[in-house]
Image (spheres, rainbow, N blue to C red):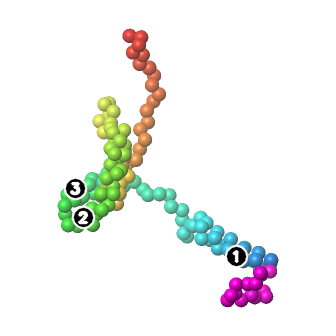
C-alpha cells in the first residue's frame, strides 16, 4: 500500500535502541524530579501551630457584622460554606461539655475569611457499663 499523499518517508525514522533507552531514562528522571517528594532547604513542614483562643475571639468579633463594605467580596465564600453548616453543627453538638465539666476547650479549624468554623476533635467516651433492658422491668 503506498503512503498517503504528503507523507515524507525518512530513512532514519526509527530510533536506535540505545537512544530510546537514553530518552526513556531522561524522561523517568524528569518525572521523579517533577512528582517526587519535595523538600525546600531540608525543612519538613510539621503543620500549623494552634493559635490562642484570643485570636479566634477577635476573629469572630471582627467578622460579626458581615454587612460591612470590606466583606463584600467574601459573600461568595460564605454562600459556598453553607453546605458545610450541618456538619459544623453536629461537631459542635458532639463536643458540648458534660454536666460535670465547667468549661471544655477543644481545638478548632476555621476558614481564613471566617466563613465557617469546625470543632476539630472527636469526643472520647467509654464503653457502656450497663445495658438498659426495658423488657425485663
Residue in the image at 24% along x and 58% along y: 63
- Percent coordinates x, y for residue 74 in the rendering: 28, 63
Residue 2, magenta (yes or no): yes
- In primary-sequence order, the first of circles 3 and 2 is 3
- Percent coordinates x, y for residue 11 in the rendering: 79, 88
Question: In the rendered structure, which segment of residues is drawn in magenta?
Answer: 1-16
Looking at the rendered image, the disc whose residue lies closer to the viewer, 3 or 2, is: 2
Q: For mark 1, what is the residue? A: 26
Q: Is the Cβ of the residue at disc 2 closer than 8 Å to that at disc 1? A: no
Secondary-structure class at tag 2? helix
Q: Residue furthest top?
A: 137
Is 20 or 2 nearer to us in this picture?
Answer: 2
Q: For mark 3, what is the residue? A: 64
Per the model, the C-alpha gap separating discs 3 and 2 is: 11 Å
Q: Which residue lies furthest to the front in this view?
A: 1
Q: For mark 2, what is the residue? A: 71
Q: Give the answer, above or below, for where 64 lies relative to 4.
A: above
The quarter of the displayed image where residue 60 is located: bottom left
Per the model, the C-alpha gap separating discs 2 and 1 is: 50 Å
Q: Is the magenta stretch mostly helix, strand or loop?
A: loop
Decide: few, some or many residues near mark 1? Use Cα within 10 Å; few <14, some 14-19, many ≥20.
few
- In primary-sequence order, the first of circles 2 and 1 is 1
Secondary-structure class at tag 3? loop
Is 23 or 97 nearer to us in this picture?
Answer: 23
The N terminus - image quarter: bottom right
- Percent coordinates x, y for residue 96 in the rendering: 33, 38
Amino acid at each position: 500500500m503506498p503512503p498517503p499523499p504528503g507523507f515524507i518517508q525518512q530513512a532514519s525514522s526509527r530510533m536506535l535502541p540505545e537512544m530510546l533507552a537514553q530518552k526513556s531514562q531522561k524522561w523517568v528522571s524528569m518525572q521523579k524530579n517533577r512528582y517526587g517528594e519535595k523538600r525546600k532547604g531540608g525543612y519538613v513542614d510539621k503543620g500549623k501551630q494552634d493559635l490562642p483562643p484570643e485570636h479566634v475571639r477577635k476573629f469572630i468579633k471582627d467578622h460579626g457584622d458581615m454587612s460591612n463594605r470590606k466583606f463584600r467580596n467574601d459573600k461568595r465564600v460564605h454562600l459556598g460554606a453553607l453546605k458545610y453548616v450541618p456538619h459544623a453543627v453536629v461537631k459542635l453538638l458532639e463536643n458540648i461539655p458534660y454536666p460535670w465539666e465547667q468549661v471544655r476547650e477543644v481545638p478548632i479549624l476555621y476558614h481564613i475569611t471566617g466563613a465557617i468554623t469546625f470543632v476539630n476533635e472527636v469526643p472520647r467516651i467509654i464503653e457502656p457499663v450497663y445495658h438498659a433492658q426495658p423488657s425485663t422491668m
